Image (spheres, rainbow, N blue to C red):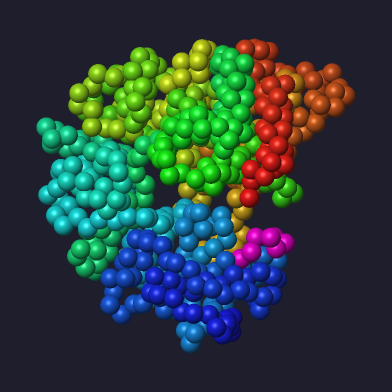
Amino acid sequence: MNVCISIPEGIHRPDKDSIKHVEFNGEDERKYSFAYKKLENTLFFKYLESKESFSLHEQLMAVTFNKSMQEKANNKLCKDILKKGIFCDGKIFHFLGHSSSQLREKTCFMMEGSDEEIQTHLKNFGDFVELSDVNIRAKKIGLLFSPFHYFVEVNEDPREMPDSIDGSRFMSRELAAKIRALMDVNYPEPSALLVHYQGFQGILVLGTEHVNTPLQDQSHESTQLVTVPKEMSRPVSNLACILDYSRPHVNAYLDVKLVMLLAARGVQVEYLRALQTDYYRLLKDVCNDSASKDYFLRLTGRAIEGSRTYEDIEALRREEVRNMVERNRSGTEVARVRILLPKARVVFGVSDPYGELKNGECYFKPTLLDGERGEFEAQKKVFVVRTPCFYPGDIHIFKLCHEKPAYQNLINCLVLPRGHGFENARADLNGNQFIVCWDAKLIPKLKVEPCSYSPTTRERMNDTWDKCLSYFRRSPQKTAKELREELIDHFASFKDDLPSRIDQVYLDLARRDSGLSLTECEQLSRMHYQATNYSVDKEYFQKRLDEFEEIEDREEGGNGSLGELVRYYACRPFQRNREFQVGGPMFEDFKKAASRFFQEAKQNQFLD
């Protein structure tokens, strides 16, 4: 039988942009809250919207399961409700799907219709049934539910638009201008867009007037993840969904891992401490000192307006301080290291569209205020890094090229040479976003080779063996109901704790007086990459992490046998190389400074 959900009396039915939202708060299906929530734009919902017989407002529902419940009870309740279906407002709703972010939040969509009808809709976007690994299947279906803020209708035939949008990632100035007008922003059209279009997901780069040749050798950067149904009527079939875009003044911050890794690469710890101290001092003074206020607004790229009130500045400071807080395993708020970098930005990275950059070179042209441009143009090098970063060698150093006429229109995006390891390594961890820093005092002095994230020989053999076994163990074709229940089981039992546990083990090891060795950094960095991409045996990784923690306990206890210590240090050949020690006593220094500022901020009511 279905789970019955009643709409409470007195709840006003909002406009057609909202859908029903049910949140289950206990271990009983009768303990729930009901509200309406605004429906975000997604590729799948645009498809449904194109069907005249379908009403998003009436036939969709969002369901959330409160994660504060005991895990086992939460999983059981989730499976029971989603497999039974929900009866509400005279309609029966069945499990539809979720985005990757919703999966972590324990939220999914349900839809009026049978399992067979839902499966038919999804099949229009790709034969997901062929994906035997439910993790991969759920992830690819999840792309259909990834929200976007803007979309444009591209009216040309996609096969005849080399200057607008194509697999080689170029867009015309006309399309860029159209998008700028849509966004209603006061800065130039974006140089790079992250889009969904005709089954393509990837970065589009602003083309120049004199370059019209498609870059066929760049097509590997586009990813054909889903297809667009043939039945979608024009212009919906030519819908370009803007997931993200390049913009000016996106500030970069150092976390505690980057602080340790930069120090391990030879950056002066005293300078890193000075950055932390100066940032905290600025936040203390920003509401009481006009020069500090103007400087803070300048650093963060906000317009200096005489109409800004004291309350406006307080709100900006509150936002900065709130971003310094995280919750530990017990749910307690604790301070985290977060240091503003005045000479750095977070930007999109794109592969060299014209092939003029040599290995080790990059092109970068940020939006800067008066007086900053000359200092920037004098810089010869930048460091570039994705976050989170666990390994010293993953902080890359590039020669900064300023004189590249063909690239002058590419603003607020990082242009990397073709074939650089960034194109293939860890691309799923933080999309195409990079920190680019031109502070000469933060450029690493010591050279360390990047970590390799390619599968090892053993991992390749295991993967091949698993595929062979999967082929010979193929079961008969599953029914639509069985396929939907597989996805429900995956959603209900999903745990995103492995990356966070790897991160915690990394930080725990960094607290030791000896810090982390290169070997430990490399192993944990590879593990985090694999865990983030759901390509691991979780039980095996949990055992590996247990071993790391046992080593930590044994080293802290100092009472291991001589044989144990010999075997332990034999596995750590890099630990004796002190110049590459990551962490150690300096780790606690930065953490304590962050904690002191957080306590002072609470006392002075900098927080909400």
Which residue sits furthest bottom? 90
The main secondary structure of the magenta stretch is loop
Residue 326 visible in the current orientation: no
Q: State the residue at coordinates (66%, 79%).
A: 30
Q: Position of residue 7 (x, y in %)?
A: 55, 82
Residue 557 visible in the current orientation: yes
Question: Would you say residue 222 sits in the magenta stretch?
Answer: no
Q: State the residue at coordinates (44%, 76%).
A: 14
Question: Would you say residue 69 sits in the magenta stretch?
Answer: yes
Q: Is residue 367 above or below residue 89?
A: above
Q: Position of residue 83 (x, y in %)?
A: 56, 74
Q: Is residue 484 above or below residue 161?
A: below
Viewer-nearest residue: 225 or 354: 354
Viewer-nearest residue: 537 or 422: 422
Q: Position of residue 59 (x, y in %)?
A: 42, 77
Q: Is residue 592 above or below residue 190?
A: above
Q: State the residue at coordinates (28%, 70%).
A: 50
In this picture, residue 69 sits left or right of residue 226: right
